[in-house]
Image (tube, coloured by chain):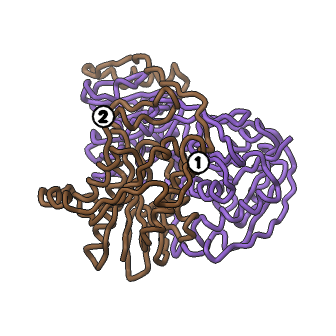
Chain colours: A purple, B brown
Amino acid sequence: MSNVLVLVDHTGGKVRKTTAELLTIARRLGDPIAVYIGDGVQDALPALGQYGATKVIALTSPELTQYLVAPKAEALQQVAAKVEPSTILISSSAEGKEIAARLAVKLDSGLITDAVDVQAGPVTTQSVFAGNYSVQAKVTHGTPIITVKPNAATPEAAQTSPEVEEFDVSISDTAKTAKIVESKPREATGRPELTEAAIIVSGGRGTGGDFGPVEAFADSLGAAVGASRAAVDSGWYPHAYQVGQTGKTVSPQLYVAAGISGAIQHRAGMQTSKTIVAINKDEEAPIFELVDFGVVGDLHKVLPAATEEVTKRKS
Amino acid sequence: MKIVVCAKFVPDATADRRFRPEDNTVDRAGVDGLLSELDEYAVETALTVKEAGDAEVTILTVGPEQAADAVKKGLQMGADAGVHVLDDAIHGSDAVATSLVLAKALGKLEADLVVFGMGSTDGSMGVVPAMVSERLGLPAVTLGSEVTVDGSTVRIRRDGDTASETIEGTLPLVLSVSDQANEPRYPSFKGIMAAKKKPVQTWSLADLEIAPDQVGGAAAWTEVVEVTARPPRSAGTIVTDEDGSGAGRLVEFLSTNKFL
């Protein structure tokens, strides 16, 4: 079997769910080798073994994390030269896409971003033009480099006991020119990560600035909270939670849009959700064209009543 | 300082966007197009830097004839000059090939500061800034939600998934800005009139010493196997909350579909 490189997405050794998804996809294509950058590889090892990594290559040079992505791309290039992978899989985050872009130029290889599915070949599926088209594509030159969106696969366990191989990389001066001078971790909300959540409840202009009912309903369902661009631009909710073309693209099992009209900018970010529910006062709102279930009504009345009912049924 | 904004001409997102059936590429000729909305933030950033000091702003675009409209919009907003790389051989280029054309043109323009938007509104891969930086061997500070240029130091705030970071680099460099960076200005009447007299150069691949077989569909390292229009979603159930039954029916729907 051929080797498939998976770049591990983690926060200080805590492996993110997207990595389990990438490892699951990698097993369709060959033997997954996990590339771990930063400290804490031992903490990450159980999760990487659970999803079938056959080996873990650890890169611990501090230069890899002090600077923006260029050193990580150089490091991956060096790993690829040694391992000769058939495919390289990276999470479709802003950082992941940038690493992939640099790697594509370095390796003279074709790049596919934002895959929502990857099958043997590899043949990728992407959702384009605000989800109105589905495109199947493949790389025809070099080592296929594919960035994969969250929820592209259901993580399937396949226990292995991978060994860790330390790998020394040499980073050029050119790669060390964009320095991270400060990093402030985002405050934890206790809710699931937006792009990974199975359920998302989003609020828009119709909230009138009060996200209380949206958050309470989200919490009753164990959901993440999102916001439309209108709500973010009004300063009602932080930009990090914006769903849409210039925010996050999400594809949860259930998406609840509360007080969101459903402009193209928003649809682009949520149209591929499995089940869509909307609550809006305006029965003409375009969001109702997308829904599996819609309530024409005031979210400030409907959401609190629904929250109460959900809580009652769950207890 | 020489600032170059890389701008893309894209099909209007509110129109019926489609693919060309003969080669599965984005139909850019048969639909209305415009300067990618996200590139307006890049133009605004460049103009703000110019107004704070001494700089010349050039709009660079690669695309078919209609792409001249993207350059024109930038000039109307206040840029000084335009360059349009126009060559039939470019049609069908992927991001890797596009980055080659841009890098060669930027080299020829001797840009100190290259500004991009966060991504296009059509392909929306968002990878070209990193590729251009890689090709030019220049630092890249990307996805800035706040940009400060202080002498030759460029500092941005980037709001990532897990942290808010401050990132710094020294000119010459490649910068990309998010839609949080500023509020792009509308062209004034004076700006629209003045734009007509501003110089726009048209360059071919030969002008950039790029061989036709280095770009276009034949040099694309990815191939679209199939394009399928997404089937319209089947009409859902819509209830009215007039009698206060909306919440109950909503929860019933969630329960039936096993979301509780």
Quadrant where the N terminus of chain B lies? bottom left
Q: Mark 1 falls on what kind of element?
A: helix
Instruction: Looking at the picture, tell me which residue is in the foreground, A186 or B232.
Output: B232
- Residue at image position (23%, 62%) is B198
Instruction: Looking at the picture, tell me which residue is in the foreground, A15 or B211.
Output: B211
- Residue at image position (79%, 45%) is A50
In the displayed structure, does residue B83 sit left or right of residue A178? left
The residue indicated by pointer 2 is A261
Quadrant of res A243: top left
A244 over A284 or under it: above or below: below
Return the x and y of residue B138 as percentages of the image width and height: 54, 71
Q: What amino acid is found at the position of numbered circle 2 in the picture?
A: Ser
Q: Which mark is residue B213?
A: 1
Instruction: Looking at the picture, tell me which residue is in the foreground, A118 or A255.
Output: A118
Q: Which mark is residue A251?
A: none
A123 over A238 or under it: above or below: above
Disc 2 packing (10 Å; few <14; some 14–19; many ≥20)? many
- Residue at image position (74%, 73%) is A170
Pinpoint the chain carrying mark 1: B
B180 over A18 or under it: above or below: below
Q: Mark 2 falls on what kind of element?
A: loop
Given the current orientation, which residue lies at the most extreme front position?
B206
